[in-house]
Amino acid sequence: MKAYIEKNKERFFEELFSILRIPSISSSSAHAADMKRCADAIVKLLLEAGADSAKVYETAGHPVVYGEKIVDGSLPTVLVYGHYDVQPVDPVELWKSDPFEPEIRDGAIYARGANDDKGQLFMHIKALEYLVRENRLKNNIRFILEGEEEIGSPSLGKWVEEHREMLACDLILVSDTTMISDKVPSINCGMRGLTYVEVEVTGPDKDLHSGHYGGAVLNPLNVLCDMIGSLIDSKGRITVKGFYDDVVELDHEERAMFARAPFDKQEYMKSIGVDELSGEEGYTTLERTGIRPSLDVNGIWGGYQGEGAKTVIPSTAHAKISMRLVPNQDCHKIAELFASHFRSIAPKGVKVKVTPFHGGNGFLIPVSSRAYKAAEKAVAQVYGVAPVPSRGGGSIPILAQMQGILGVNPLLMGFGLERDTIHSPNESYLISQFFKGMESIALFYEYYNE
Amino acid sequence: MKAYIEKNKERFFEELFSILRIPSISSSSAHAADMKRCADAIVKLLLEAGADSAKVYETAGHPVVYGEKIVDGSLPTVLVYGHYDVQPVDPVELWKSDPFEPEIRDGAIYARGANDDKGQLFMHIKALEYLVRENRLKNNIRFILEGEEEIGSPSLGKWVEEHREMLACDLILVSDTTMISDKVPSINCGMRGLTYVEVEVTGPDKDLHSGHYGGAVLNPLNVLCDMIGSLIDSKGRITVKGFYDDVVELDHEERAMFARAPFDKQEYMKSIGVDELSGEEGYTTLERTGIRPSLDVNGIWGGYQGEGAKTVIPSTAHAKISMRLVPNQDCHKIAELFASHFRSIAPKGVKVKVTPFHGGNGFLIPVSSRAYKAAEKAVAQVYGVAPVPSRGGGSIPILAQMQGILGVNPLLMGFGLERDTIHSPNESYLISQFFKGMESIALFYEYYNE
């Protein structure tokens, strides 16, 4: 595709800039008309690139753009996910050029959305154009480009649910993340899942004076701390009964592949201001955040939190606790295991309530899969170096949701770099990454169909 | 004194009512003039009762009334502490009669301050009157009656410090508490002390995303819970190194005396809404709150406490922790022991800060002491039943402070009952307790001087 890019690059810039100029800020109702205008512009780009059809679907929030190129119903189908909405631009005075008037400086495109995600989704539209015009497309492609990613995708799940038959596919392909560096390309082949609960421990039915009752009555704050303290053992393992039952251990070879990712412990510790790392025994830091589950208290409160001293034994104590899960662990099953374990460790004399919040399963494209192998070959060819498989420690709730509804896994081929400072002033996207991304995507399809 | 009371009771009521009519609410600046008026009225009562001198001392807050009757400098001196300020009266619509227009109903005086503490301090003034007029006083008596007890005595400590020579005494005598019941009279011979600290645990230097870092970084909330959980062992003992070194174990006989206090476990549990009691192994509930130290978390906070879920590993976690101490434990020493223990149990990778707040030592009048024995005999004679020694689980900071400055212990002969509902609407004071209190106090002096 290199030659095609070289020939058409000025037009590519102009087309991308035309959508970057639209301030499609989803969080601000003042931009509702811009959202619609941007969705329409993207429909036009899809059709011009060779989609059979493309249209705007209204939702309760901002519209969804859907387009497709069906070569043959019997061929594999890839569903490309992206989003055309962008973050706000404040503090706007820190921008060196107008966030909605794209500018090329030092080999990069500067604009809000240059990378996240207009620049990245645009690569997919141009890969389609190339494959169609050169008559090289041997699979079907569907596009879902939403307008609410930056506000948590409140409408898309329902829309996907309602259109699940139309969206049937073999793979979800996404470019909305970063790679380790342009010297160490990486492909994200999995994200962790999440179970999130709120717990409440109740002791006496009213707040008590700690002088009059201290020593004779179970204090819910002490009890909650004690219970939470017991959830992780001295080896960094989660003690919830049955918690690890469905965790798949990676074999030596796979761990060795992950271990190729560069990691500077001193740099990592410095970046978060700690002088010691900690976690499950027998695993590296990247493994602890990528391929192993974890348990964190995300919030805790109870009793007196103001200035000075108040001698109270409060009636209740609360905490929010989340568990990151690895693929194959089910978020609902883990919520249940947690709840019964937590109740079982409560001492007599307190009542325990566990309220599960939203959660989601992790997802995983095995490095041995057809999709991963195709992406690996494509990126290796374009970058001249084999990519490192990586795993995301967090969750992307909308992808987890789509995976749940459509029953297929997402593969995350992201071409952003840390330097792009998405969500901040002076967001940019390196032109070299922009073009290498297009090329990798087009090549991906060729290897995927081999 | 019975006959004297019988002869003078109408005058006693009228004199008490004259001060109950003054709305000396210390928490409201609107009542500043009433405070002054009440202090003046009490000076007058002291002088009429036979004090050599009595006057109002201005402070930064409400005035202190000081009066004395010095029989002979070589005789023992008792310092009577009380307070003439009262609680607010809201919700005033729940009062059956005007809180500042005393009324006698069903054998009790109803008014704000009827018991707490105007009614109780008045008994001491009348005991003085009786002993002086009947020429029976064989010791010196000083009175400190403050106007800021209900707002935490902010000025009295300084005033006592400044007048410590004038206040030299052998005993502090206080009637500002309750007894178990009028069938089971009790004398409070000790209160617990207090050490109160705030702790802070800091991990990363900023809040982190629990997806990206969960499992690899020490979470200050998990760490704080774990550390707090370890402060009390499975036998209910506090694990702070050296914590029990200065605790004096009571002998069998003394414990048997305390055990005479009636205690209904079911009733106690019902009153606070729990179905199980807990605490240090080998001690009863009353011992756990009276003669044994305790440790309670009074407040805890950190991370996300709002609605729903936020996946954060916060940079810091906080808690307020207090320890109730028994006499002979030093509150400053315990604060230091706690701080070094708490630091010693922190894992590498977090920083710990311990900030001590105010504290105070406990105090104790041994049941074998002259003062306790005299009170015991007096109460036994008036009530026809031997009183039970009791210990207060809480602290009375101003008494702990006075004890520290003057170097003498307080003895708490309180004649209130639970039914008096001090601090609430319809505060009252049983006339029988009012008169028995006067009688007990007068007799106390006689036995004290034997």
Image: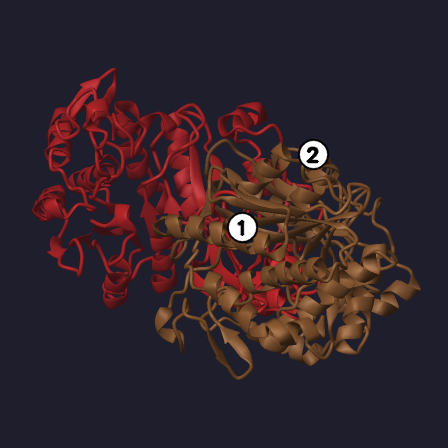
Chain colours: A brown, B red
Vertical relation: B348 (above or below) A130 = below
Upstream in sequence: badge 1 or badge 2: 1
Q: Is residue A276 left or right of residue A31?
A: right
Which residue is outermost to the right? Answer: A252
Location of the N terminus of chain B (image quadrant):
top left
Residue B298 spot, x, y in % from top left: 49, 49
- B401, A325: nearer the viewer: A325
Q: Amino acid at mark 1?
A: Val
Which residue is outermost to the bottom? Answer: A106
Circle 1 residue: A43
Circle 2 residue: A165
Q: Residue at x 62, y 71 (%)?
A: A434
Closer to viewer: mark 1 or mark 2: 1
Do we see residue B117 in this rendering?
A: yes
- B94, B400: nearer the viewer: B94
Q: Amino acid at mark 2?
A: Glu
Question: SS at mark 1?
Answer: helix
Vertical relation: A286 (above or below) B429 = below
Circles 1 and 2 in contact, beta carbons < 8 Å: no
Residue A382 spot, x, y in % from top left: 76, 74
Question: SS at mark 2?
Answer: loop
**Chain at numbered mark 2:** A
